[in-house]
């Protein structure tokens, strides 16, 4: 595994591999790698001859400066994991390297960015589109891997790739959960012991909603999920939405396989998201 921090060097290394006909996989991350990232990297290693893991805390997708400041950074530990998993390159550029001048590009991500995270975090998905498009244009991977925990992001990246006509296949990978059900997230590292103990109530509420959803419908299920999470004093629900898994349009009537619950929850100073398909 080789650590690279400039775009030029990565381009040079990948050109050599491409001349040999090697397929290339990209796993974009913001570091603080956990078992969820490991599952993406493992899949990329299985499916591609060469794997680039990018490790870059992208400032343009943070709409809250203290969230950017506090975002966990564990590069040396990340490098050990990436090496162990058999990836070829760890690309860890500086902010100056990725943004030598301000990125003023505005992407048309509607309607997917008008709901949920897009509605609550202005500019967030435009920042994601800026960095992901830069990485895809730099690496030109055959496949790029994204986790389904950030499900709205996954759909937005797919739409952006279609709009820009980029050649990469975007591969969505299932959420990896802790033994107690908490969806893996780099932000879990920031949870206080009390909030960490409470956080599994989020996935439990999602998992337990199916009987109510089938028997009493969408509104009752959303209410039950919110009540179950808010019953834990350390957690406060920001939103519970039920949406179509392909379009993210709100779902009002339950049809099996066509409803997905999305939640955002404040756990102390940490904001957690999760989702569940029914
Ligand atoms: O999901 C993330 O970690 C980030 O949004 C991504 C895709 C690496 C872009 O910075």
Image: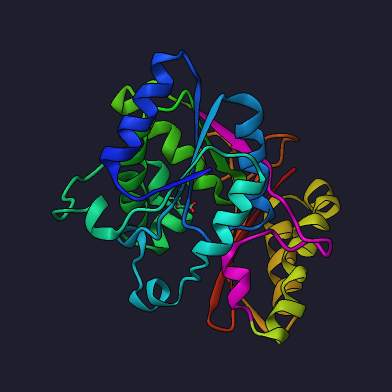
> Above or below — where is 78 with respect to 1?
below
Within the image, what quadrant is residue 232 found in? Answer: bottom right
> Above or below — where is 194 with respect to 274?
below
**Residue 190, image x, y percentages:** 58, 77
Foreground residue among 246 and 272: 272
Foreground residue among 87 and 224: 87
Quadrant (top left, top right, bottom left, bottom right) of the C terminus: top right
Q: Residue at x 21, y 45 (%)?
A: 106
**On the picture, is 117 further left or further right than 206?**
left
Foreground residue among 15 and 228: 15
**Residue 243, image x, y percentages:** 58, 45
**Residue 138, image x, y percentages:** 31, 34
Quadrant (top left, top right, bottom left, bottom right) of the N terminus: top right
The number of callouts visible is 0
Q: Which residues are magenta?
A: 170-191
**Residue 154, image x, y percentages:** 50, 41
> Above or below — where is 150 with respect to 139?
below
Which scheme is used to colour this image of the protein? rainbow
Q: Residue at x 38, y 23 (%)?
A: 16
Q: Is residue 186 magenta?
A: yes
Q: Is residue 101 visible?
A: yes
> Above or below — where is 49 with respect to 209?
above
Q: Residue at x 83, y 61 (%)?
A: 179
Q: Is residue 162 visible?
A: no
Q: Residue at x 37, y 31 (%)?
A: 13
Q: Is residue 77 magenta?
A: no
Foreground residue among 27 and 205: 27
**On the picture, is 64 further left or further right than 75?**
left
């Amino acid at each position: 595994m080789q650590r690279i921090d400039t775009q030029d060097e990565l381009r040079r290394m990948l050109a050599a591999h491409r001349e040999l006909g090697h397929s290339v996989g990209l796993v974009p991350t913001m570091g603080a790698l956990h078992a969820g990232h490991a599952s993406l990297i493992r899949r990329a290693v299985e499916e591609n001859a060469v794997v680039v893991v990018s490790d870059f805390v992208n400032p343009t997708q943070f709409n809250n400066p203290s969230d950017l400041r506090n975002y966990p950074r564990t590069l040396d530990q990340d490098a050990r994991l990436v090496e162990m998993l058999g990836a070829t390159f760890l690309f860890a550029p500086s902010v100056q390297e990725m943004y030598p001048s301000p990125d003023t590009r505005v992407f048309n991500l509607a309607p997917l960015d008008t709901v949920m995270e897009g509605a609550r975090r202005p500019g967030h998905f435009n920042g994601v589109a800026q960095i992901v498009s830069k990485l895809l244009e730099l690496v030109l991977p055959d496949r790029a891997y994204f986790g389904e925990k950030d499900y709205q992001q996954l759909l937005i990246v797919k739409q952006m790739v279609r709009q820009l006509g980029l050649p990469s296949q975007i591969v969505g990978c299932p959420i990896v959960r802790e033994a107690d059900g908490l969806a893996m997230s780099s932000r879990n590292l920031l949870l206080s012991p009390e909030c960490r103990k409470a956080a599994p109530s989020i996935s439990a509420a999602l998992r337990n909603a199916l009987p109510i959803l089938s028997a009493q419908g969408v509104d009752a299920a959303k209410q039950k999920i919110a009540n179950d999470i808010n019953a834990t004093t350390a957690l406060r629900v920001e939103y519970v939405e039920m949406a179509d898994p392909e379009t993210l349009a709100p779902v009002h009537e339950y049809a099996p396989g066509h409803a997905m619950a999305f939640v955002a929850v404040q756990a102390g100073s940490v904001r957690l998201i999760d989702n569940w398909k029914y």
